[in-house]
Image (cartoon, rainbow, N blue to C red):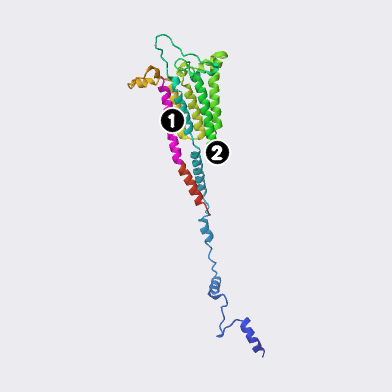
Amino acid sequence: MSDGALGPGRGEAGDDRGPDGREADGGGGPNVGAAGDDQQHGDSPAPDSSGAAGVHGAYAVDTPEQLLAEVATVRRQTRLARHAYWFPLVVFGLLTCASIPFYIQHIPATSGSYSSPSPAGPAFLRSNYLGGFGIITSGYIAYYWLAAILVGVAATAAWYQWRGNRVGRRTPARGYMITGTVLLFVALGIPALAVRAAPVLRILMPGDLLIRGTFPLVIVGIGLCYLAWAERSAVLTVIATGYLALSLVASLYDIENVFYDLGWNLSPAANGLPNVVLPALVLLLSGAGAWVVQRRRRPHSSGRAAAGSVSQAP
């Protein structure tokens, strides 16, 4: 009787035989059988490729070459966004145009010797480096260039300070301000020392370089060369060196001779104006061109930055 009592229990919890005497698969079904077959044949399970696919997706890891290329691109775009040298070019171009009335020669109506009256004020401020010897130019031009260079340097430093706060990368404008101030002190100090304490310093005041009163243009050109170095700009370097060369020519040579060779006869009162007008035009045209180029680059740089932020979003 024990077999009859154990029959039902053996059928439920025993060897799980069905009514036809075969073994039941249970809950495993065909998957269990397939897995069993794989294990019996010694085959390893297929690797999960979801992790490899994710590496090439939103969380892709760049190669070192790609990272270096991206760093170089960001650095170049940041340098281009920092460039704002059109402002000092335009400012000093306008200041040079404003000095034109001081270079108009006043020819006396009657024959005889003529000399421009000496203006009032401290003599050391009327430096020969800033106003020449007072023979061709007005006696007040030294005062003008002293104030004009100080205003131009201060305006340029303030512009780069404001621009740096806006862009996030500053040009070392403090060094430019120091350079311009030192050049002015040297231009004021050498003539004063040459007259009172060290006459040997007069060798640093050649008449051919100072007589036309355009040496302040050379000081402006030296300041622009320093600004080109601070900006790391090849374009500004070309502009600054070309302007410096032209200002040296304007200080050593009468450019009016070129107009005479072309058949253009200037009036005696305007003989010295080409030496001032041409450098001013170089600054104004260069500044206008730089403004146009830098303004066109601004939307492209912002669009690239926005596209980069979108592509990196998970």
Q: In the rendered structure, find residue 85 and report the number of the disc placed on it.
A: none
Residue in view at x 53 percent, y 39 percent: 166
Q: Is residue 289 magenta?
A: yes
Within the magenta stretch, is there residue 145? no
Q: Quadrant of the N terminus?
A: bottom right
Pick whichever, 281 or 180, lies toward us.
Answer: 281
- Spatial CA distance of label 1 from label 2 is 26 Å
Considering the whole magenta stretch, tell me its main secondary structure. helix
Regarding mark 1 in the picture, which secondary structure is present there? helix
Task: Sort mark 2 into few (<14), some (14-19) or many (20+) by Cα contacts within 10 Å.
Answer: few
Q: Residue furthest bottom?
A: 1
> Percent x, y for residue 200?
54, 14
Where is residue 162 drawn, in percent x and y?
54, 36
Q: Is residue 281 visible?
A: yes
**Residue 258, position in %: x, y?**
36, 21
> Seen in the image, is 205 located left or right of residue 285?
right
Asked which secondary structure carries label 2, the reply is helix
The residue carrying mark 1 is 284
User: What type is the residue that disc 2 sits on?
Assistant: Asn
Front-most of 121 and 163?
A: 121
Farthest-out residue, front: 109
* Mark 2 lies on residue: 165
With respect to residue 73, does 176 lie above or below?
A: above
The residue at 50%/23% (across/down) is: 145
Q: Which portion, as a residue range, is magenta? A: 272-297
